[in-house]
Image: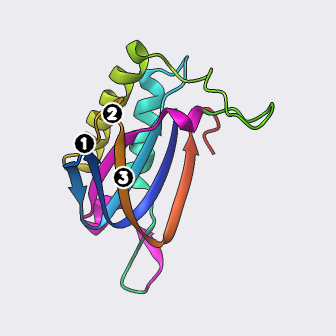
Amino acid sequence: MRLVIQRAAEASVTVEGREVASIGPGLFILVGVEGGDTEQDARWLAAKAAALRIFDDSEGVMNLSVVDAGGELLAVSQFTLTASTRKGNRPSYYRAAGHETAIPLYDRFCELLSEAAGRPVQKGIFGAEMKCALVNDGPVTIIIDSKLKE
């Protein structure tokens, strides 16, 4: 599994002209699920995202997690995070998990993140054509891959 975590001043998701999720300050997280990913990947990433210290403390140092900062959470499924650009200019998505794997793992990641953060996680709609709006605060953007565990 792969995450793109962005510290947001605000973020929202719209589907067919209707807002389905929105947050104020917090984390906007894009979630890519690959074939072979398991609940262990979701569990590790959820714990990492909840504890990631990318919010400023009173000294202006990135030393607080989303939990410490009282931030909100929004997670959006994003199969294009699994893209391979190795050959040619048209990305290939052969690594993306099928719906039967991706939907339950995305949902489980959101549940685990909610548990780890102690607050609800707003979500986009899996497989929908979504319009995502984000005011990236900083900008701060972190990429985490459960296969690399850096």
Q: Are marks 2 and 1 in contact (CB under 8 Å)?
A: yes
Q: Quadrant of the C terminus?
A: top right
Is residue 49 inside the magenta stretch? Answer: no
Q: SS of the residue at dot 2?
A: loop
- Residue 18: % across, % down: 19, 48
Residue occupying image coordinates x 39% and y 12%: 100
Residue occupying image coordinates x 61% and y 26%: 93
Numbered badge on residue 128: 2
Residue occupying image coordinates x 49% and y 32%: 79
Q: Amino acid at mark 3?
A: Cys
| Residue closest to the eye, 93 or 109 | 93
Residue 108 vertical placement versus 67 (above, below): above
| Residue closest to the eye, 96 or 69 | 96
Residue occupying image coordinates x 29% and y 59%: 67
- The region drawn magenta spans 60-82
- 77 to the left or right of 112: right
Q: Residues within 10 Å of mark 2 (few under 14, many from 20)?
A: few
Q: Residues within 10 Å of mark 3 (few under 14, many from 20)?
A: some
Q: Name the residue carrying label 3.
A: 132
Q: Residue furthest bottom?
A: 59
Gap in Å between the C-alphas at discs 2 and 3?
A: 11 Å
Please indicate, yes or no, whether residue 75 appears anywhere in the rendered image.
yes
